[in-house]
Amino acid sequence: MARGNGTTVTEFVLLGFTEQPELQLPLFLVFLVIYLITLVGNIGMILLFEADSRLHTPMYYFLSHLAFIDLCYSSSIGPKMLQNLLVKKKSISFSGCFAQLYFSSAFATTECFLLATMAYDRYMAICNPLIYTAIMTPRVCKELVVGVYTYGFLNSVIQTILTFQLSFCDSNIIHHFYCADPPLLALSCSDTRNKEKQLLIFSAVNLTGSLLTVLISYICILFSIIKIRSSEGKCKAFSTCASHLTVVTIFYGTLFFMYLRQPKAGNSWKYNRVVSVFYSLVIPMLNPLIYSLRNTEVKDALEKMLAVKESQ
């Protein structure tokens, strides 16, 4: 990429989460704890789902992939942010910025559609229990997951290439703690209208399309729950829905706020950074707790695994 003066952009500077030096060490410790919990929680869930045969069902198959995506999503952003909180030169290479934008965008898009797939799975389990096992076979589950990953990474290829075809000549300082589309577009001296239009269209299609699948699935689930006569059955079904809807609301809400508006709007980047922390670091930490640890089957499997280790 050529600057306006003919030089080549070789790196960007990430301003980080805060520009106040006295806050950087406390923030490093806070985000380090969050990242470590994310690693332990998500890796633990993946290993638990693999180890216990009782959890070899479509629901836990999708949850294991959610844990994997959260692990990778957080790892595409967290380590570099932690490093920059400790060093004075908060730079990232041009290729590093490209890779970070690509992988963070890919895993974010993949998670959107995986959440939609999980909602569909819950719809089939609650609304069509008699044909659930016949429809949601291991082959179908694998095909759904492969489709989700494929679309997420192809979508990210398009968006990342469109972004890095732009020229950056006014400044290389990114007002963010990682390479994201909106702050990168704010740096460009090229005509960004085409990229902004593409970003808006793809974001709208991805977010509204996947969210619409979630909403339709859960509206159907709600009507099915109302028809359940057993109070215990209603509570069990509602508990599953409540956990999923909690994460869906937080995840989709922050993404809508971040992307479904013009990237060069006059709002302060400080608000965007706070919002980004939630969906890039906090949500991947919370998902194992919200989805799994509140589940009695997961609790039983975890207790069984710990009991076996203690007896050895």
Image (cartoon, helix red, strand yellow):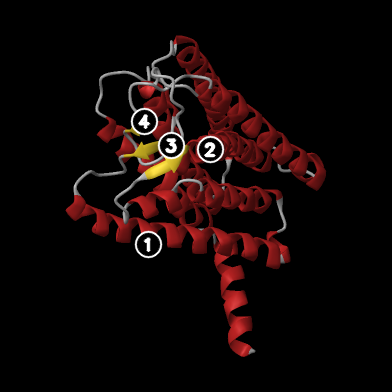
Q: Is residue 293 visible?
A: no
- Residue at image x 64%, y 64%? 47
> Residue 16, percent across and down?
31, 43
- Residue at image x 58%, y 42%? 228
Q: Is residue 285 visible?
A: yes
Disc 3: which residue: 11
- Depth check: 243 or 3 in front? 3
Quick one: label 4 or label 3, which is nearer the N terminus? 3
Disc 4: which residue: 172
Q: CA distance from mark 2 to mark 1?
A: 28 Å
When asked about the image quadrant of residue 132, the answer is top right
Disc 1: which residue: 33
Q: What label does residue 95 carry, if any? A: 2
Quick one: label 1 or label 3, which is nearer the N terminus? 3
Q: CA distance from mark 4 to mark 2?
A: 14 Å
Q: Is residue 205 above or below residue 146?
A: above
Q: Is residue 257 above or below residue 51?
A: above
Secondary element type, mark 2: helix
Secondary element type, mark 3: strand
